[in-house]
Image: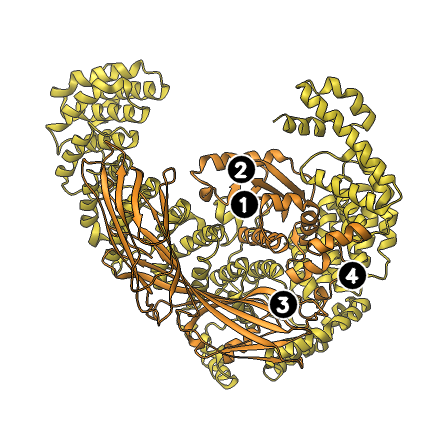
Chain colours: A yellow, B orange
Amino acid sequence: MSGNGLTYSEQGGEAAPELAQEAAPTVTPSTPAAFGLFSSDTKKNEDLKQMLESSKDSAKLDAMKRIVGMIAKGKNASELFPAVVKNVASKNIEIKKLVYVYLMRYAEEQQDLALLSISTFQRALKDPNQLIRASALRVLSSIRVPIIVPIMMLAIKEASSDLSPYVRKNAAHAIQKLYSLDPDQKEMLIEVIEKLLKDRSTLVAGSVVMAFEEVCPDRIDLIHKNYRKLCNLLVDVEEWGQVVIIHMLTRYARTQFVSPWKVMVDEYSENNFYESDEEQKEKDQKLKTTYTMDPDHRLLLRNTKPLLQSRNAAVVMAVAQLYWHLAPKSEAGIVSKSLVRLLRSNREVQYIVLQNIATMSIQRKGMFEPYLKSFYVRSTDPTMIKTLKLEILTNLANEANISTLLREFQTYVKSQDKQFAAATIQAIGRCATNITEVTDTCLNGLVCLLSNRDEIVVAESVVVIKKLLQTQPAHHGEIIKHMAKLLDNITVPVARASILWLIGEYCERVPKIAPDVLRKTAKSFTNEDDLVKLQILNLGAKLYLTNSKQTKLLTQYVLNLGKYDQSYDIRDRTRFIRQLIVPNEKSGALSKYAKKIFLAQKPAPLLESPFKDRDHFQLGTLSHTLNSRATGYLELSDWPEVAPDPSVRNVDVAESAKEWTGILGKPKKEKPTEKFYSESEEEEDESASTSSSGKCLESTAFSLPGKLCLQNCLVHK
Amino acid sequence: MIHSLFLINCSGDIFLEKHWKSVVSQSVCDYFFEAQEKAIDVENVPPVISTPHHYLISIYRDKIFFVSVIQTEVPPLFVIEFLHRVADTFQDYFGECSETAIKDNVVIVYELLEEMLDNGFPLATESNILKELIKPPTILRSVVNSITGSSNVGDTLPTGQLSNIPWRRAGVKYTNNEAYFDVIEEIDAIIDKSGSTVFAEIQGVIDSCIKLSGMPDLSLSFMNPRLLDDVSFHPCIRFKRWESERVLSFIPPDGNFRLISYRVSSQNLVAIPVYVKHMISFKENTSSGRFDVTIGPKQNMGKTVEGVVMTVHMPKAVLNMNLTATQGSYTFDPVTKVLTWDVGKITPQKLPNLKGIVNLQSGAPKPEENPSLNIQFKIQQLAISGLKVNRLDMYGEKYKPFKGSSFVSDGEQEPKSLSSQNFT
């Protein structure tokens, strides 16, 4: 532990080396052992400095490796900064890399010294090797020193029109770094983003969309022209980029297209028309006047569908949420199979996926009903997975499957995992209220559980029975009597409180037992939990109002105990009840209504899924998982009433022809319509196309041919 | 996106930290430790934790917690999937993803993390590319390096980053060109005490080991592709071709990788290749019970069932067990109450049996539930779903490769007890 303390004290004193040495005896007043360690550390640093200054690369490399080891452990190595930074221009690529690692970690703390390295990077930015250009840009932009903002800006601009897509990708990353360092640069950065969004390389797409999301997520207008290109590139973007692009396009689509959910009838014809040939398409269009899905909307749905087959769980989830938020309801079902597949994955993935399924299954049961058995709990699942599966099973319960489910639940109740058993009892309660056919069966089952040996199971059953009896105001005198007997043995406060409340509420149905219960609890009042005390007071008040002959003295005794209780909550309640039920000259008109107040018909509690209120968050997001708004959460807007002008997404002919023939590989089908639209738009688009600079076009030419041929073989083979 | 990463071992020491943006103090991990304390066991530590200024997303792999610090909204699966990819990469580089391996190779780990993320966004995660950027440690190389002073770091941009096929490195050369496909299937079944199947499904993967020179273009076809109900692909597979012809067509990465994973739907009847006869009873008031289990093979198409292991989570009241096994050996851990019986191979002539006495804590009530039995086994040379490879063709290169495929069925019979026991 002393080692740990040492780390902290070291970090605290970011002093220059000699200062630290002097201050050491006073600053670290801990054990002498710690002091010894500390001094040996400074000695070690001297060694390292010497090694770094040696002429041999191997010594330098060795020193750098040890320094990186220190950084990895969280030890402070900042005092070596001057010695390390000298090596930034080293010829040895490994030393250089390790120096970069060091710089990124400490430059922020030692800004002045860090400036010494800048010129090296500026030189490297012009290097003929793209790898060196890219890594120079990476490090330069990672040095969080405000003075170099203009240099960074310049470097990013230059890199954004670099010939190598790899360098451009790094430029996209650098945009976010510069933005977080100096948000004032926003306008200029948006210009760069705009330029990079036009880039055709799949390498760049993911990164620039990421930058877009971070810097200017509200500038939807920048996406219009690139929408179709992004949709078409999507399959070939690397998996991480896919996730980001899909999330961005989901938001975009919700602002640009009208809701496909309103007209249910049309959806089926919608469905065939895209899968069938063109004649069908025309016929259909003539027939339909009500709702036609925007072709761009359809394009997005069609191009994301194959990604459900991705090996990356995040991509599958992203597509699933896209379908959930954008697809006609009849089509959203295709995602369920893939989501169920993810349940075979690691526990963390399962956890997130199950949470999302839980939300989905509340609104659209049908989607997951065929997979009911996949949610059966396994004895080896961790508790958190078990409870989520249980949640889904409960959501999916209906008249047809309830008997199977209840049998399954019976097993769960016996589980050795008591937390899970308790959750199962809650689930049975929910099924009982939702499906009236089985209410009595469930209730009987729960009553049987009351004689269970395990206290937690009994307590949970009591709580659930209480809720069920409330929703079922029929005569359940027997059950209440049974529960009154249990009171002698149960110690769990919630359960005791529930029983007392039940007896108070239905005291007229058990006129003989209720006063006796009050007598017993009055005896144990002082030892009860606060929760139980409150219910004893309630019970007393209710009995006083209905049966004051037998219980007047008892109630007064309880009220007196309550008056001097330690908890102010209970003292408050006592005072309130006394004023209300015992009429005296001060208690005004209210006490006349005491009976009505206490014995009013209470609304039954709704047994609801805890996932009920999560659906206002976009699925698959951190906010959804936490059920609270995370920083930077972007709201999904509602569908617009009228779709904004779809022609903003048209691109001029030259570009579009290339795009459609090359990337989609279906020139015959799509090209004519494309031309038709774009011809009329040509003039407007001209300005846009010229602004996408010459350099950028050159660079795409370099990467495109390869891309195209791959695309073609993907399609034709 | 990902701000920082902390690696924490089981005893709660932070043994590695890496920051991609400004430094986040280690003290943020206190929230994680708090959650860890609340959870009953490591399995139950919530993967997503919210703290006042950050969010922590963690995974647990090979006795290490990978805790990432997040500051803004991000799809949690994105981070989880990435962390698993990091762990896979360590596994790939060092042969194991353990604390010692990471500590021994801390410099390579740092270089890897540096390449995998830039400003918190994944940069290069494909193993073929990473291996060109940073060479994995081998004994030979470390010797050579220490003599010549050369390094592990590649000095050119991996061509894969730029090529059309980002998962394959260029200039691959082998003297023996080989391609192997391992079909591994897992049955996952829940069986009730009467022996009827409650739920069964087959999950399979095809793991490949491809050592082919140049840029081979492979296509693999199956005799009965319709069996595959739901498939997920390595990015190298051409989706359109699968959609239209049910043929896997791809340019493979170099080395080992998982080609596809698939599920065979439960509509197809799954024949469970083993059965279990069991008799577990606890007597009231005697603090002892009897235990008698026999495992036998059933419809296994003449193949032997091997590697049979049975695990039973006994009730908490069990103190110890005195058993005799006719075959294999058993262990009972009195702390976790787990009985493991390593059976080995099943010969139909002499069925393995395990029986004896169970000692219960005196005075403890008789366990109300009989434990569920979990059985794992392996069958070589048989894909339980009946999946058959038709042929493998190669285009684009002239040599003749050696092709091989093997099948393994792994059973994982999940336990379930409807009032008594079951096995999987």
- Density class for disc 2 (Cα within 10 Å; few <14, some 14-19, many ≥20) is many
Is the residue B293 above or below the residue B211 in the image? above
Confirm or deny contact between disc 1 and disc 2 (CB under 8 A). Answer: yes
Which quarter of the rendering shows the N terminus of chain A? top right
Q: Nearer the viewer, mark 4 or mark 1?
A: 4
Q: Give the residue at mark 4.
A: B156
Can residue A197 be seen by looking at this rendering? yes
Per the model, the C-alpha gap separating discs 4 and 3 is 19 Å
> Disc 4 is attached to a residue of which chain?
B
Q: Nearer the viewer, mark 2 or mark 4?
A: 4
**Which of these two is toward me, A299 or A496?**
A496
* Dot placed on the residue nearer the N-terminal end, 4 or 3: 4
> Disc 2 is attached to a residue of which chain?
B
Per the model, the C-alpha gap separating discs 1 and 2 is 9 Å
Per the model, the C-alpha gap separating discs 2 and 4 is 40 Å
A193 to the left or right of A527: right
Residue B304 on image: x %, y % = 38, 66
Question: Which residue is most to the bottom?
Answer: A279
Q: Report the disc number at residue B32.
A: 2
* Dot placed on the residue nearer the N-terminal end, 3 or 2: 2
Q: Residue at x 20, y 54 (%)?
A: A437
Q: Give the residue at mark 1.
A: B58
- Density class for disc 1 (Cα within 10 Å; few <14, some 14-19, many ≥20) is many
Residue B56 lies in quadrant: top right
> Disc 1 is attached to a residue of which chain?
B
Q: Give the residue at mark 3.
A: B253
Per the model, the C-alpha gap separating discs 3 and 2 is 38 Å
Confirm or deny contact between disc 2 and disc 4 (CB under 8 A). Answer: no
- Secondary structure of residue under mark 3: loop
